[in-house]
């Protein structure tokens, strides 16, 4: 699947033995498509772009199944929880919204960034953590099991792209907690193969 500023979402298939991609379908949108991601084990795609709404679209025929409203600006990121029920959307309004796609009339919760648009979102493979990244300064790791109440934030060193040592922060519920992970000084932060934060 490919999203583009030409306002189209395209679906491709790998041509076996040819080393090329074969176009299967394309669907037009009224705005630039900044990102699209398919729900695990499904034909439902979350499509975000130069519009405040997130569209849930059937990739078999391009039909819009639902419109998710809650962001105030353009969106750049989306991620499905491995269970396929939770969807996270990241926006230029500096927030991530969490949705239960079985009930799309309002988001479950809103996670605030520090100072920039939310440009990247990823759930760990086991679904335990959600990583939320701002373009220049902060990476946030949320504990899904805590209802996104426990969070660790890493400020990034300007110009180097490396996370500094983790700093414990107060959770959105204002109760103090232990850091989810403490990165050694000078090490990058990532979600490891087993789904835990690491370097």
Image: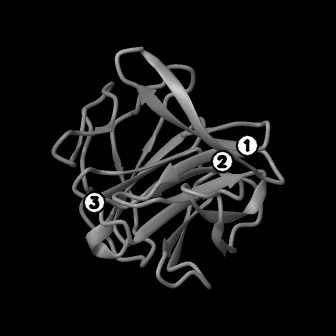
Q: Residue 35's spot in the image, x, y percent?
A: 61, 45
> How many neighbours does mark 3 have within 10 angstroms: few (below 14), some (14-19), or many (20 or more)?
some
Spatial CA distance of label 2 from label 1 is 26 Å
Spatial CA distance of label 1 from label 3 is 30 Å
Which circle, 3 or 2, is nearer the viewer? Answer: 3
Q: Looking at the rendered structure, which numbered label has been put on residue 8?
A: 1
Where, by quadrant of the figure, is residue 177 drawn? bottom left
Q: Residue 71's spot in the image, x, y percent?
A: 70, 67
**Quadrant of the frame with the N terminus:** top right
Q: Is the residue 35 above or below the residue 111 in the image?
A: above
Residue sitting at x 51%, y 85%? 103
Q: Residue 94's spot in the image, x, y percent?
A: 65, 56
Q: Looking at the rendered structure, which numbered label has been put on residue 127?
A: 3
Q: Which residue is mark 2?
A: 116
- From the viewer's perspective, is 9 left or right of 109? right
Q: Residue furthest left?
A: 194
């Amino acid at each position: 699947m490919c999203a583009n500023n030409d306002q189209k979402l395209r679906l491709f298939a790998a041509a076996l033995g040819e080393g090329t991609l074969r176009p299967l379908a394309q669907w037009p949108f009224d705005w630039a498509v900044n990102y699209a991601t398919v729900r695990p084990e499904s034909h439902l795609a979350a499509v975000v772009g130069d519009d405040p709404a997130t569209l849930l679209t059937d990739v078999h025929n391009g039909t819009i199944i639902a419109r998710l409203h809650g962001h105030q600006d353009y969106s750049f990121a989306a991620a499905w929880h491995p269970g396929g029920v939770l969807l996270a959307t990241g926006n230029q309004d500096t927030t991530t919204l969490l949705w239960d796609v079985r009930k799309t009339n309002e988001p479950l919760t809103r996670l605030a960034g520090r100072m920039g648009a939310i440009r990247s979102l990823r759930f760990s493979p086991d679904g335990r953590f959600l990583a939320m990244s701002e373009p220049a300064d902060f990476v946030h790791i949320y504990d899904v099991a805590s209802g996104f109440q426990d969070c660790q934030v890493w400020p990034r060193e300007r110009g180097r792209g490396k996370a500094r040592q983790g700093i414990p922060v107060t959770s959105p519920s204002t109760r103090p907690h232990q850091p989810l992970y403490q990165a050694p000084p000078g090490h990058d932060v990532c979600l490891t193969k087993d789904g835990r934060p690491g370097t």
